Amino acid sequence: MTVKKRIVVYHEENDLAIRQCQQGETDTKDSEEDIKLKYITPAIEKAGWDKNSQIRMEYTFTQGKITVRGNFSIHGKGKRADYLLSYRTNMPLAIVEAKDSSHNLGDGMQQAIEYAMMLDVKFAYSSNGSGFLEHDFLTGKETRLAPEEFPSPDALLARYRQGGVITPVEDVPFYYSQGGKTPRYYQRVAVNRTLEAIARGQERILLVMATGTGKTFTAFQIIWRLRQAGLKKKILYLADRNFLIDQTRDGDFKPFDKIMTKIRNKDLDSSYEVYMGLYQQLAGTEEGKEPFRAVKPSFFDLIVVDECHRGSARDDSQWRRILEYFSSATQIGMTATPKETKEISNIDYFGEPVYTYSLKQGIEDGFLAPYKVIRLDTNVDLQGYRPTEGTLDIDGNPVEDREYNRKDFDRNIILDDRTKKVAELITRFLKESKDRMAKTIVFCVDIEHAERMRQALVNENSDIVKDHSDYVVRITGDNADGPKYLGHFLDKNDDYPVIATTSQLLTTGCDCTTCKVIVLEANIESMITFKQIIGRGTRLCPEKGKEYFTILDFMGVSRKFADPGFDGEPVVIYDPGPEGPIIPPDDPDDPDKPEGPGEPVPPFPPGPEPDPGPGPDKPKLQKIHVGSGVVSVWLLSKRVQYYGPDGKLITDSVTNFSRKSICGEYATLDDFTKAWNGSMRKKAIIEELKDRGVFLDALKMEAGKPDWDDFDLICHIAYDQKPLTRRERVDHVEKQNYLAKYEGLAREVIAALIEKYEDVGIEEISDLKVFETDPFRNLGSTTKISRAFGSKKGLEKAIKELQDNIYA
């Protein structure tokens, strides 16, 4: 390929050529790495950027999306910027994307803009070595720059500040301890956006971050930097559940240990600086005599409200009075699910989110676990249940003759046979997935349903329960053992409990890092509750084998994934009306109901926490209870869905999806065979297909043919060709007396390669690293083996000829 010739100018400091413009023709071509080494890096350093503290090359800031097919998962490639330029560690200012000399100056700009927007930097540059194209987010303009015109750090910082972007703590670094966590890119953006808002005088701030993305770690870094800068001294961290306070205090907030206190007995000891407290404890029950009034309204400088979609969102909430009393303090609301209804609004109180990091973005970046959904419908769920004449409940009373559907089950009517079937199907899934130790949460209609489901699951798993009585437990607010079991269930180093039944206690806040299975056994109407429940499974834990999670949906609730509100931006629809907000009647599916007047304030540390819903602990109406052996229940429908490329669920089987993906890359059999035969490293093609979600191991498992050759499997799946096993292909090679063309060591090597292919497939013999493994190590070094074929090129030629013969 010919490209335009560059006229060059030499810098005295490094004597490296930097191209200024393009004219004429030459046959030389510089790779992207050449362009960076020869031209871009010298130009940036010449502008005054320090290579040790201000320039980060090959900056990878995401982990790469995880794709799931069958029971297999694979990480994609993370996003990587060629250059990230920072004035200080806390202050990234610019992104530079490089292209090789065959590209035009601005060919890297779209990628640079995408990365700059994600990293929240205000200047993006594209370069092919001849100069730079600059995109200024503060003005919206693009400018061509000669190499020597690249701006200095001080020049960019001055423009940054002129654009109105300021932060009061730019000199204060993020907290870091040896071996500890460092902020991910979106956490850094969230912290800096918050600090910028405070610098502008904003007193109420909303951060929306998906469950599992580190809201408390982000809150800690905000507090740390504000305190280190001397801008905020007295801090109040509010949550509504005791274990959330303990989890935060013993986790991300641990560095505050010497200056932090957990408020006990409603006593605000003024000698501390960071206070952890429960909303309901500080709010009290008698207006005008609330515990928070023991200190002055100006006592706190900063209040962080965890899970602010809960009680603090209501105008009439007792908890809201805490925020109003300390109105002079900066108040930061944090939630994964902001609440926006006509009666309740996070945004009306805290303002529009200064930053949003969604579940979809977290999955795309590879920081959150994707999910697959298995919809399981029994005959009574899809067809309804109508009692036959003379059907009696467990007390011997006639069951009302009417149609009951899945909305009635376990809320109005109990069918013991359905409960037993659901427990059987959950257990069957764990057995078939060969992971009966997979942490599982079963979300039930109410506490009573959770107890019945616990009993049914115990009976289905009696082979384990006889040795481990805590294999299945109930974790609900009314159960004194709940907090004990909860701690062990959440601890990723504790094997037991494995299965937890609950109603609403586990819907929010708890870090279920190792949870691999979410079971939906309740008819969930609230989108917020649904999103919170899904959030229990989104944390990754690769060290425990968790890179995705499975949702077993018995109630058709997964239809909410198709709702635009599932992962969309919150929309304000708050309408308080001329006389204030209309307070809706109690919603039986709303876990955020305010505590009514006269309810006792829980002691601190509280006893059993009240389970907030979806219904009261005891039903208002007596449920109809139909005992075992009365109703015939069976699995009528099963559908497997995967998290798709656009964030929506796709229903394709592994085979169908793979066929579409392969044909999307290689339209015809001829296209594929040309690519396959033209590449010595077949592994590169297989890896390329993996990036498109084609998992050959999953396909072999689905087909029940583990010995099929990769090439044959692909041709069979995508192009309906008859497949051969690796043994059949080896037989074909041996019938030709292929080894006769070699002698001595070369013959031994080729024979070992054929045997290796039959054992493990073509990937292994496509890479020269195979000669570092057995049995080749016994034959000599790679250098010695190469000499048996004349040279390294001779060896590579022999391997390519063998591959061609295998696939002849």
Image: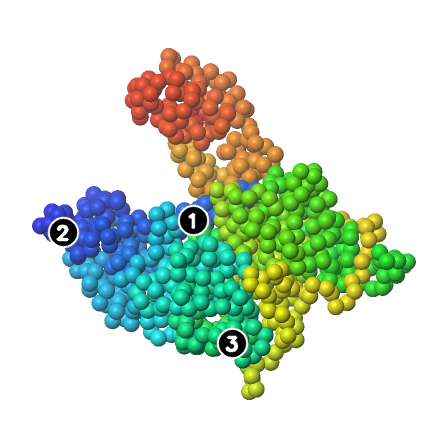
Horizontal and vertical percent position of residue 26 = 18, 45
Figure coloring: rainbow
Q: Which residue is mark 1?
A: 64
Task: Give 22 or 87, whichever is nearer the viewer.
Answer: 87
On screen, residue 725 versus residue 165, left or right, reads right
Horizontal and vertical percent position of residue 524 = 64, 62
On screen, residue 17 versus residue 140, left or right, reads left
Q: Which residue is mark 2?
A: 7
Separation of marks 3 and 2 at Cα, in angstroms: 70 Å
Residue at x 78%, y 53% (from the top left corner): 416
Q: Residue flagged by tag 2: what amino acid is it?
A: Ile
Element on which disc 1 rests: loop
Element on which disc 2 rests: strand
The numbered disc on residue 780 is none
Separation of marks 3 and 1 at Cα, in angstroms: 44 Å
Q: Which residue is mark 3?
A: 321
Task: Give 617 or 786, whichever is nearer the viewer.
Answer: 617
Residue at x 45%, y 38% (from the top left corner): 686
In primary-sequence order, the first of circles 3 and 2 is 2
In primary-sequence order, the first of circles 3 and 1 is 1
613 w.r.t. 323: above or below: above
Most extreme residue toward the right, as rendered? 390
Q: Residue flagged by tag 3: what amino acid is it?
A: Arg
